[in-house]
Image (cartoon, rainbow, N blue to C red):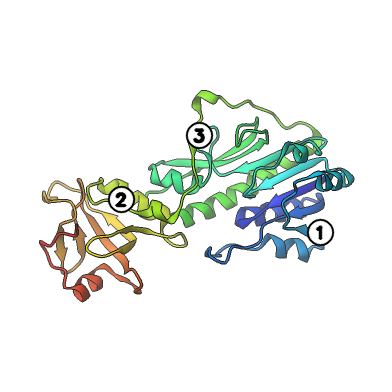
Amino acid sequence: MSCVVFAYHDIGYVCLQSLIEMGASIRAVFTHEDDPSETRWFRSVRALAEHHHIPVFTAVPRGPQWTSRLREWNPDLIFSFHYRRLLPDAVLETARVGAVNLHTSLLPRFRGRCPVNWVLVRGEQETGVTLHHMVREADAGDIVEQQRVPIDTEDTALTLYRKLTGAASALLRSAYPKLRDGSAPRVPQDPSLATYFRGRTAADGQFDWQSSGQDIYNLVRAVTHPFPGAFTVAPTKFYIWRCSLISGSSVPAATPGQVLSATDHLVVATGDLPLRLNRVQAEGGVEESGIDWAARLGVREGDTLT
């Protein structure tokens, strides 16, 4: 079965690798040029395709010249794996069997951008990967297959992404033979259950000490390394890269942002439960332990970081 693959990032890499290992006839791979401003911690789809002598393109396939070329390749299937652009109808229609996308959530929930980060921000306990048919509306097409992935309380976006990468490969290895022989199901999504989320920027990492401790903790783990990080601007801008929530009946009442301890650990009050700040970084400085940061700035118990 012939196919054209649109792929990027680690999920793109493992899914392309899975198709190669399953003997798919891959006519071409479309990927993205790496953004020099983005921390690149993932494997290269381009390098993998070139290693297997598959033609690679970084151009956006818009216009009649690309539609004509796709028709010449005559793909049975078009696959999209973490590709960052919506494919136009003219491209999707060149696939004889269908065009499918792998999305990193359990559709119809968490449609849209950055689902791995958003499920952590929202405190979800489960997510997954979904292979679905592509239609004009993003992430709205019929579902082929899903695989569920539990979210641990200490998962970060990176650890969760790695779980989803393994699940994506397993899902594709299960679904591809069914797509090939025509036995793959098509289950319509229930639009009443759909939720949509936008892309995130570095500015979305700012938090307020008046928020709940759980909400701040969730934000920190959602945007910690290799993402831009969670930050506050008081007393000066600094980032929290790792923290832990303190619960229990002995938690003292305090003003949000008040330092409860600056000796053994740096502990700060929030809107409810306090947080232990394990790893922080002043803007322009180096990452360090919370206690070292407090000592260097002369932050003491009773001070307020607002």
Q: Residue at x 25, y 65 (%)?
A: 236
The type of residue carrying mark 3 is Arg
Residue 155 can be seen in this image: no
Which mark is on residue 6?
none
The type of residue carrying mark 2 is Ile
Dot 2 falls on a residue whose secondary structure is helix
Binning the other alpha carbons within 10 Å of mark 2 as few (below 14), some (14 to 19) or many (20 upward) gives: many
Number of numbered discs: 3
Q: Which comes sooner in the sequence, label 3 or label 1?
A: 1
Q: Which comes sooner in the sequence, label 2 or label 1?
A: 1
Q: Residue at x 75, y 38 (%)?
A: 92
Q: Which comes sooner in the sequence, label 3 or label 2?
A: 3
Residue 231: give x, y in percent of width and height. 33, 58
Judge from the rendering whether residue 122 lies leftward or rightward of residue 170; answer left or right.
left
Instruction: Quarter of the image for the N terminus: give it.
Output: top right
Residue 85: give x, y in percent of width and height. 64, 47
Binning the other alpha carbons within 10 Å of mark 1 as few (below 14), some (14 to 19) or many (20 upward) gives: few
Q: What distance separates the C-alpha of mark 3 from that of mark 2?
A: 23 Å
Q: What distance separates the C-alpha of mark 2 from that of mark 1?
A: 45 Å
Q: Residue at x 30, y 50 (%)?
A: 216
Q: Which residue is mark 2?
A: 216
| Whether residue 218 is situated above or below residue 239 in the rendered picture | above
| Whether residue 42 is situated above or below residue 196 in the rendered picture | below
The type of residue carrying mark 1 is Pro
Residue 187 can be seen in this image: yes
Judge from the rendering whether residue 242 lies leftward or rightward of residue 189; answer left or right.
left
Q: Which residue is mark 1?
A: 55
Q: Which residue is mark 3?
A: 109
Instruction: Quarter of the image for the C terminus: give it.
Output: bottom left
